[in-house]
Image (tube, helix red, strand yellow):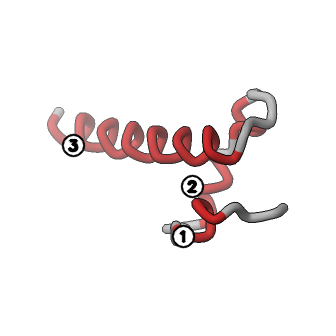
């Protein structure tokens, strides 16, 4: 897989979560690198918010 500049800049926190968030694994078609990067940022923030919500309950 070819890394784009935006992906190379970001350091993967742990491989498990980064592979889980691949669009292909969620049944989505392959998408543009920029869109993929935005998708990753959104998903990571979403997952973090979900964890915080669970912690509050």
Crowd class of label 2 (few under 14; some 14 to 19; many from 20; radius 10 Å): few
The C terminus - image quarter: top left
Q: Nearer the viewer, mark 1 or mark 2?
A: 1
Residue drawn at (80%, 36%), measured in percent from left and top?
A: 30
Crowd class of label 3 (few under 14; some 14 to 19; many from 20; radius 10 Å): few
Q: Which of marks 1 and 2 is nearer the N terminus?
A: 1
The N terminus - image quarter: bottom right
Q: Mark 2 points at which residue?
A: 17
Callout 3 secondary element: helix
Q: Earlier in the sequence, mark 3 or mark 2?
A: 2
Q: In which quarter of the image is residue 4?
A: bottom right
Q: Between 21 and 33, which is closer to the camera in this rendering?
A: 33
Q: Residue 55 carries which label?
A: 3
Q: Earlier in the sequence, mark 3 or mark 1?
A: 1
Q: Are marks 3 and 2 in contact (CB under 8 Å)?
A: no
Q: Between 6 and 25, which is closer to the camera in this rendering?
A: 6
Residue 3 on image: x %, y %: 73, 64
Q: Which mark is residue 9?
A: 1
Residue lying furthest left: 56
Q: Which of marks 3 and 1 is in front?
A: 1
Left or right: 51, with 22 as reference point: left
Residue drawn at (24%, 35%), measured in percent from left and top?
A: 53
Residue drawn at (54%, 70%), measured in percent from left and top?
A: 9
Q: Is residue 50 above or below residue 12?
A: above
Residue drawn at (63%, 42%), measured in percent from left and top?
A: 36
Callout 2 secondary element: helix
């Amino acid at each position: 897989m070819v890394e784009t500049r935006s992906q190379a800049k970001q350091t993967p926190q742990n491989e498990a979560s980064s592979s889980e968030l691949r669009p292909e694994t969620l049944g989505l078609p392959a998408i543009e690198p920029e869109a993929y990067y935005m998708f990753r940022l959104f998903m990571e923030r979403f997952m973090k918010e979900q964890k915080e919500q669970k912690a509050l309950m």
